[in-house]
Amino acid sequence: MIFSRTLLRQHSVLPGFDLALGFTVFYLSLIVLIPLSAAFLRTTELTWPAFVEVVTSPRVVASYKLTFGSSLLAAIVNAVFGLLVAWVLVRYHFFGKRIVDALVDLPFALPTAVAGITLTGLFANNGWFGQYLEPLGVKVAFAPAGVFVAMTFIGLPFVVRTVQPILEDLASELEEAAATLGASRLQTFRKVILPIVLPALLTGFALAFARALGEYGSIIFIAGNMPMISEITPLLIITKLEQYDYAGATAIAVVMLMMSFVLLLAINALQAWTRKRQGK
Amino acid sequence: MSATAAIPGAPTPIAPRSLAGATKEPAWVRWLLIGIALAFLAVFLFVPLFFVFFEAFKKGFDVYLAAIWEPDALSAVRLTLLAAAIAVPLNLVFGVAAAWAIAKFDFRGKSVVLTLIDLPFSVSPVISGLIYVLVFGLQGWFGEWLRDHDLKVIFAVPGIVLATIFVTFPFVARELIPLMQAQGQEQEEAARVLGASGWQVFFKVTLPNVKWALLYGVILCNARAMGEFGAVSVVSGHIRGETNTLPLHIEILYNEYQSTAAFAVASLLASLALVTLVLKYIVERRVQREMAQAKDVGAAA
């Protein structure tokens, strides 16, 4: 009754609004809001200078650079190859296409710990890939490059799955019109197709980037976790926690949460843009 | 095309074949693009997937079985199943309640609730675990109270269940909400006017309309619940045979250089992932059909 009177915009013949919204808000508060607010409230136990000192100490800053840089690089690689994979899956026919299409979601379904030990095994210096990379001077496992490889794996489906439906809906008339007006295939792609898929491509890029920023499970196996060199920010939170430095762990967590929230807003804006472009 | 041809004096229409040629890449470009795409997927998907099973069975089937049929591994299986068995139904009930409130009613603050539901997806798994330590850990808000009452949440099963619930929180809700929004409330209102009770409306009208989307959400929710590592790792305390889930057990085996055993346990989770993908593939089409029907009805109304 309380909810109905204060929140409901119009009367409905359907029952259950109070129960449904009441349970939703209760469960949301219990599981998400109260625990998350704990992170922010616990940070207030630190003075501002102490907070700044924790979150700008050299080891933490080095971890930001690695986490941010690798996430960005992995997201860029995923944007390029994700667009290519989506294009190939929508436009071309080849043997086993449906299986390939279904397998694209593997990084969503495969537990990160499994991905972690598998990629480490493949890229270690005696592994299937590592043994060919090592003579070239490329060290992936137990090095910063490993962070990038793990992030690329876990972010792989995002761009494919956001771009694919847009390419499927693309009206062939547009390309035909461009062709009749004398555009080459490359020009058509650059000036007609790319602008249409751009919002979805950016959304996929941002989703992959956000996922990579917070990733932990697959990375800690392959990274080697050397302080200042191949230590990601989420791992620093765990390290602080294991030293019972709750305030320090929470301070770093708050910085990461702020980054995530900014990205969430950006992604929402990008998705709204995509919908607008699609006229839905 | 024929309409253009009928107009006298119009430019000669381009033959369809040459137009098809102009909107398609030459064969060599097509095969080059397919080749590059498949090479990329091979490095990051196909080979890793094969590698898990290759390593698991490298030393023969007996070694494989011994690694899985072992007390610590079995207790990890039990805990993983338990966590999923609690987290998935709770998030299912929540998803249905949230979708009912959001899709069937118009209320103030709806977009805020929608954003908050998605929040757990944008939080790092490590932080998902950390927040429960801050609330229930020894130095946490309820830490002393819990200790005085001899209750354990962190480094115990309840913490693992809570962390699992958090990371799988949005799955069912975010599948149901867009579908139920597209379906509108006309059918439910009609049933209500014809004298059905609220629960009758829900079970006989709403639920059959969304059953595939519901199943889809449950499949994704379950896969994540059984595979979560980061969040569970923070709250588990890694007590062998007690607070280890399957992903955590893999980590312990791997760090003890029992690589074959680690991959054997990993192959269980990889098989689960493959089953998930197959189910997802089957159900996805049905969900799309539900959505298309909802949009058709919406367009007709």
Image: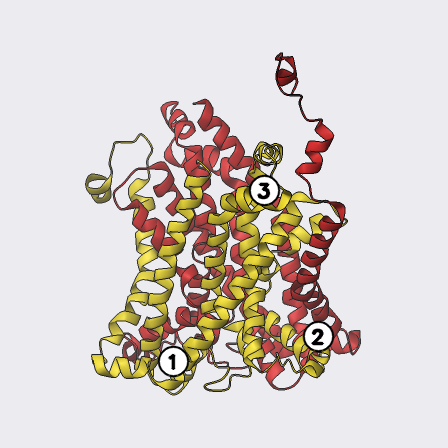
The answer to whether residue A40 is left or right of residue B99 is left
Mark 3, chain letter? Answer: A
Q: Earlier in the sequence, mark 2 or mark 3?
A: 2
Distance, label 2 to label 3, CA atoms, is: 37 Å
Q: Circle 1 is placed at which residue position?
A: A61
Q: Is B11 drawn above or below residue B119 in the view shown?
A: above
Q: Which residue is mark 2?
A: A129
Looking at the picture, how far across and down is residue A125, in whole percent?
68, 83
Q: Nearer the viewer, mark 2 or mark 3?
A: 3
Q: Secondary structure at mark 1?
A: helix
Q: Earlier in the sequence, mark 1 or mark 3?
A: 1
Residue A182's x, y, as percent?
Answer: 61, 36
**Mark 2 residue type:** Phe
Q: Quadrant of residue B45?
A: bottom right
Figure colour of chain B: red
For the residue pair B93 and A277, the one nearer the viewer reads as A277
Which chain, by letter, is yellow? A
